[in-house]
Image (cartoon, helix red, strand yellow):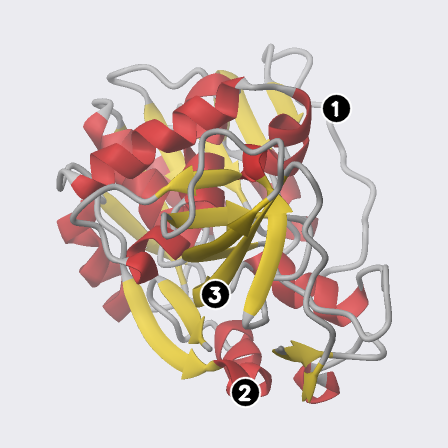
């Protein structure tokens, strides 16, 4: 099969489009012909500095396609099914083998491209808001990187739950586009101090729940605009700042909570998120939630797609098509 591979971590120029051996299908695995790859933020971070589990390495968490074969222990998925899959790597390729526990049947009426964009961003957004963030109707939520995949998912989910939704983005134009997805107030973090903006918009109270994918100094500032008993969810390092020591001295007196979150751990250790993601797929298929696809690149242009994402120009998901 063909795949976008690299032999060392680094910038997007490390990608090579090469022939590599087809994946091996174990007794609990499903082999799919990949038809759409949603590039996740974690994919770009892994390409930059992640572990090389094999060489050449195929990066990528999430993709969707059609089932070509199944292992002898697979009972819920059949040949010809369309599925979306999640794994630690291997999405940037023409074929992918993945355990049946990390596959979801694509609902009727949903495109394979839409399905490829759902489990990681929508699952992460849902868990950060509700399972760990305990968001309630009437509360205020701040969502960083509102124009990204998790951001657009979180805005829709929070609005549907009856929350007041604030979000940050790098331009007024991108913030304006988020209005149709449920954004109440946008904050241009390039032009404004988001801590002061959140305090102003909440009459000094702060946000009850913060969804932070940026990390670094942004995470520190997020803690400074939490409300009393506020909950801050940190799940990414999109800001790519080196690890810094957080000052949590203000949290104890305000009974605040900081939670680190990783969807992969939940999927490995609990059956709960599998049903949650299946429900989200059904919600999107029925029109209750929306997937936004910004651009499509051929698989052999992974080296162009990754820097486009890193430039923060995208509004929604960027996908690769083998």
Q: Quadrant of the N terminus?
A: bottom right
Residue that mark 1 sits on: 249
Q: Is residue 179 above or below residue 262?
A: below
Disc 2 element? helix
Label 2 vs label 1, nearer the camera: 2
Which residue matches tag 2?
300
Q: Residues within 10 Å of mark 3 (few under 14, many from 20)?
A: many
Other-residue count near label 1 (Cα within 10 Å), few / some / many at <14 / 14–19 / ≥20: few
Secondary element at tag 1:
loop
* Mark in the foreground, 3 or 1: 3
Q: Residues within 10 Å of mark 2 (few under 14, many from 20)?
A: many
Residue 207 in sight: no
Look at the numbered disc 3 and give the secondary structure of its residue: strand
Residue at image coords 56%, 19%: 271
Q: In 3D space, how far apart are the residues under numbered discs 2 and 1 (Cα atoms)?
A: 49 Å
Q: Is residue 38 above or below residue 277?
A: below
Q: Nearer the viewer, residue 122 or 219?
A: 122
Rounded to the nearest angstrom, the CA distance separating label 2 from label 3 is 13 Å
Q: Disc 3 designates what residue?
A: 34
Foreground: 135 or 21?
21
The mark nearer the N terminus, 2 or 3, is: 3
Eye-nearest disc, 2 or 3 = 3
Residue 62 appears in the figure = yes
Q: CA distance from mark 3 to mark 1?
A: 48 Å
Identify whether 135 is placed above or below 216: above
> x, y (%) of residue 161?
24, 23
């Amino acid at each position: 099969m063909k795949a976008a591979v690299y032999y060392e971590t680094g910038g997007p120029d490390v990608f090579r489009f090469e022939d590599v051996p087809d994946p091996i299908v174990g007794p609990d695995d499903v082999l799919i012909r990949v038809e759409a790859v949603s590039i996740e933020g974690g994919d770009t971070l892994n390409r930059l500095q992640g572990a090389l589990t094999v060489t050449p390495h195929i990066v990528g968490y999430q993709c969707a396609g059609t089932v070509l074969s199944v292992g002898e222990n697979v009972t819920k998925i059949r040949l010809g099914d369309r599925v979306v899959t999640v794994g630690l790597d291997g999405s940037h390729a023409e074929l992918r083998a993945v355990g049946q526990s990390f596959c979801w049947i694509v609902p009727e009426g949903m495109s394979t491209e839409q399905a490829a964009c759902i489990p990681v961003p929508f699952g992460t957004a849902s868990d950060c808001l509700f399972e760990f963030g305990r968001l309630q109707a009437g509360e205020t939520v701040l969502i960083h990187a509102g124009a990204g995949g998790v951001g657009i998912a979180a805005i829709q989910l929070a609005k549907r739950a009856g929350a007041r939704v604030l979000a940050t983005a790098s331009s007024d134009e991108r913030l304006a586009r988020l209005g149709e997805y449920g954004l109440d107030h946008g904050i241009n973090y390039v032009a404004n101090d988001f801590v002061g903006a959140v305090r102003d918009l909440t009459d000094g109270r702060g946000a009850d729940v913060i969804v932070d994918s940026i990390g670094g100094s942004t995470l520190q500032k997020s803690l400074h605009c939490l409300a009393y008993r506020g909950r801050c969810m940190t799940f990414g390092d999109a800001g790519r700042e080196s690890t810094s020591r957080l000052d949590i001295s203000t949290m104890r007196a305000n009974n605040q909570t900081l939670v680190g979150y990783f969807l992969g751990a939940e999927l490995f250790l609990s059956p709960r998120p599998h049903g949650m993601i299946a429900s989200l797929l059904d919600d999107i298929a029925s029109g209750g939630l929306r997937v936004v696809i910004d651009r499509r690149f051929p698989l052999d242009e992974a080296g162009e797609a990754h820097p486009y994402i890193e430039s923060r120009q995208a509004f929604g998901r960027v996908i690769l098509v083998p």
